[in-house]
Image (cartoon, helix red, strand yellow):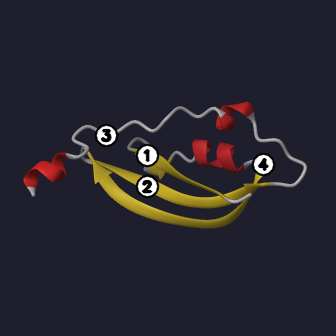
């Protein structure tokens, strides 16, 4: 079964690299079908949101950590653009 997910990966200002451990952990038991990165700034920090299409590898069980990911939190100011219309 094909699944879609968006994972946000922050830029580590100390190293200048994106911390992709969450992304790699999610994909460890999955076949990646499609990935689209989208870069943006939030509170002055560079972020990368990656749209993923994947499916669980045949015979593999996804780790419990990825099966029980918490719901996405809304960033501060989410929806404030609606008030500006």
* Residue on which the image places disc 2: 48
Q: CA distance from mark 1 to mark 2?
A: 6 Å
Q: Is residue 16 left or right of residue 4?
A: left
Judged by depth in the image, the label closer to the viewer, 4 or 2, is 4
Q: Are marks 1 and 2 in contact (CB under 8 Å)?
A: yes
In this image, 37 relative to 65: left or right?
left
> Nearer the N terminus, badge 4 or badge 1?
1
Residues packed near mark 1 inside 10 Å, few (<14), some (14 to 19) or many (20 plus)? some
Q: Is residue 4 left or right of residue 59?
A: left
Element class at badge 4:
loop
Residue sitting nearer the eye, 16 or 62: 62
Residue 76 screen position, x and y as percent:
25, 37
Q: Which residue is mark 3?
A: 75
First-in-chain label (2 vs 3) = 2
Q: Earlier in the sequence, mark 3 or mark 1?
A: 1
* Quadrant the C terminus occupies: bottom left
**Callout 3: few (<14), some (14-19), or many (20+) C-alpha neighbours within 10 Å?**
few
- Whole-angstrom CA distance, mark 4 to mark 2, is 22 Å
- Looking at the image, which is closer to me, 4 or 23? 4
**Residue where numbered disc 1 is placed:** 10
Q: Is residue 41 above or below residue 67?
A: below
**Label disc, if present, on residue 29 of the rendered structure:** 4
* Front tag of 3 and 1: 3
Q: Residue at x 68, y 36 (%)?
A: 67
Q: Residue at x 50, y 57 (%)?
A: 50
């Amino acid at each position: 079964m094909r699944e879609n997910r968006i994972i946000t990966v922050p830029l580590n200002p100390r190293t200048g690299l994106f911390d992709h451990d969450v992304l790699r952990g999610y994909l460890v038991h999955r076949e990646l079908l499609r990935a689209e990165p989208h870069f943006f700034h939030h509170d002055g920090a560079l972020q990368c949101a990656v749209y993923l299409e994947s499916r669980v590898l045949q015979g593999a069980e996804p780790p419990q950590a990825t099966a029980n990911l918490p719901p996405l939190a809304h960033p501060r100011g989410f929806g404030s653009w609606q008030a500006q219309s």
